[in-house]
Amino acid sequence: MSQRDDAIFTERELDIMDVLWDRGSGTVGEVREAIQDELAYTTVLTILRTLEKKGYVGHETEGKAHRYHPLVERDEARESHLRRLLRNLFSGSPELLLTQLVSDRDLSEEELRRLRELLDRRLG
């Protein structure tokens, strides 16, 4: 996994990966159709090829088309992005991130209660 150790995606790459994670696989046309933005076919193809070069997706030939599938799990990407976010914006401090989350966001009481339950389970 050396090529994919730090699964960090651009916003456009993430849009495409979301489609692949949700559907399991897709051709360029299927991915393009599933994305909310109007991206050109060649743009989606270029991004998929870039993701393949990075080792994040693979493909099988299906007739004249290629069917792309993710090679990295969504959770793996979340963890990688979170580690980078912690390192770059919060000096590696989960406490600073959590403080930012609960103080600057308009969280409902129910969301705060669920966060407390998660912390209590982790501590207990």
Image (cartoon, grey):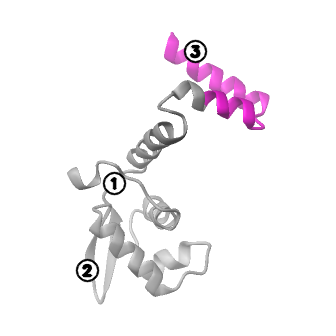
Residue 94 appears at what percent x and percent y? 52, 28
Can the viewer see residue 27? no
* Residue annotated with mark 3: 120
Left or right: 110 as drawn, with respect to 5: right
Other-residue count near label 2 (Cα within 10 Å), few / some / many at <14 / 14–19 / ≥20: few
Residue 40 appears at what percent x and percent y? 52, 85
Which one is earlier in the sequence, the residue at label 1 or at label 2? Answer: 2
> Which element type, helix, strand or loop, lies under badge 2?
strand
Can the viewer see residue 72? yes
* Residue 61 on the magenta span: no
Q: Mark 1 and 2 residues: CB-CB less than 8 Å, in contact?
A: no
Residue drawn at x 45%, y 78% is: 44
**Quadrant hosting residue 25:** bottom left
Tell me the distance, in whole angstroms, between the alpha carbons under discs 1 and 3. 31 Å
Left or right: 37 as drawn, with respect to 9: right
* Residue annotated with mark 1: 72
**Range of residues picked out in magenta:** 98-124
Other-residue count near label 1 (Cα within 10 Å), few / some / many at <14 / 14–19 / ≥20: some
Q: Amino acid at mark 3?
A: Asp
Other-residue count near label 3 (Cα within 10 Å), few / some / many at <14 / 14–19 / ≥20: few
Q: Amino acid at mark 1?
A: Val
The mark closer to the camera, 1 or 2, is 1
* Residue annotated with mark 2: 61
Left or right: 59 as drawn, with respect to 122: left
Which one is earlier in the sequence, the residue at label 1 or at label 3? Answer: 1
Q: Amino acid at mark 2?
A: Thr
- Seen from the viewer's position, the closer of residues 71 and 62 is 71
Which one is earlier in the sequence, the residue at label 2 or at label 3? Answer: 2
